[in-house]
Image (tube, helix red, strand yellow):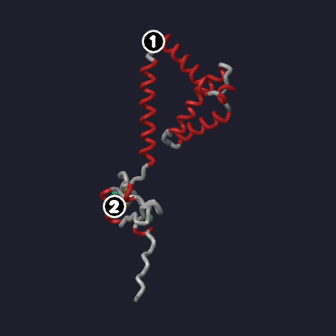
Amino acid sequence: MPSYKLMQKIHAVQRRLKIQGGEMTNADRVLWGELALSSFASESGQTDDLTADPETVLGDLLADLMHFCDSRGTDFDSALERGRNHHAEEIEEAADAARPTCNKTYFVAGGRVERTCGEPADPESTCAECGKARCQEHASEEGFDDSTGRVLCEDCQPPTQPTQPA
Ligand SMILES: [Zn+2]
Ligand SMILES: [Zn+2]
């Protein structure tokens, strides 16, 4: 049996996906992988090995999956290729989601509805202090400046020293 703690985490993910309509994250996918591997380790008497040497247990599971594919006439290598593609896409999606997007807001419908731009933000137009981020189209309005070593919007720049009267 997979551990109680793991099943609790998986049930929490299922609740989040079903009830709250959330998106599956790569952290959730780690749990599915752990479920498969720990179920296999538990039933094949390798639970202790799973902590000490997970690669050995994974190798055994993969070999068994290859035998399973042989018996069913399923192409293991083709499935592995699919898995690699999913994995790469999911990593890329997570990286995209972590990139800041333009948070310029504007009003539509005669001022009744507020919208956020949401286009990818320009790194040179993303304030390190307040998180204000602008796409190329909206960048020019905010006076971003990197002369302090960090990109800062006009509001977050240190006040310029008034010139002392001579
Ligand atoms: Zn700022
Ligand atoms: Zn924008």
Please report the residue visible at 38 percent of the width from the left and 60 percent of the height from the top: 105
Q: Earlier in the sequence, mark 2 or mark 1?
A: 1
Q: Name the amino acid type tagged 2.
A: Ala
Q: Quadrant of residue 50?
A: top right
Disc 1: CA contacts within 10 A as few (<14), some (14-19) or many (>=20): few
Residue drawn at x 45%, y 38% as measured from the top left: 91
Give the image location of residue 52, x and y in percent.
Answer: 66, 29
Q: Secondary structure at mark 1?
A: loop
Judged left or right of residue 48, residue 84 is left
Numbered circles on residues, count: 2
Q: Amino acid at mark 1?
A: Gly
The residue at the point 54 percent across, 17 percent down is 63
Query: Badge 1 is on which residue?
Result: 73
Residue 114: percent from left, percent from top: 38, 59
Label 2 – label 1 distance at C-alpha? 57 Å
Task: Name the image quarter holding the C terminus.
Answer: bottom left
Q: Is residue 44 left or right of residue 146?
A: right
- Kindly identify the residue that appears in the image at 42 percent across and 52 percent down: 100
Q: Please state the horizontal and vertical placement of residue 96, each as a whole percent of the image.
A: 41, 45
Rendered view: 17 above or below 135: above
- The part of the image, by quadrant, that contains residue 86 is top left
* Foreground disc of the pair 2, 1: 2
Which one is nearer the viewer's eye here, 3 or 114?
3
View extreme (bottom): residue: 166
- Which residue reaches farthest top? 71
The answer to whether residue 28 is visible is yes
Callout 2 secondary element: helix
Residue 139 numbered mark, or none: 2
Question: Where on the image, by quarter, is ligand 2?
Answer: bottom left
Label 2 crowd bin: few (<14), some (14–19), many (20+), radius 10 Å:
some
Establish if 95 lies above or below 48.
below
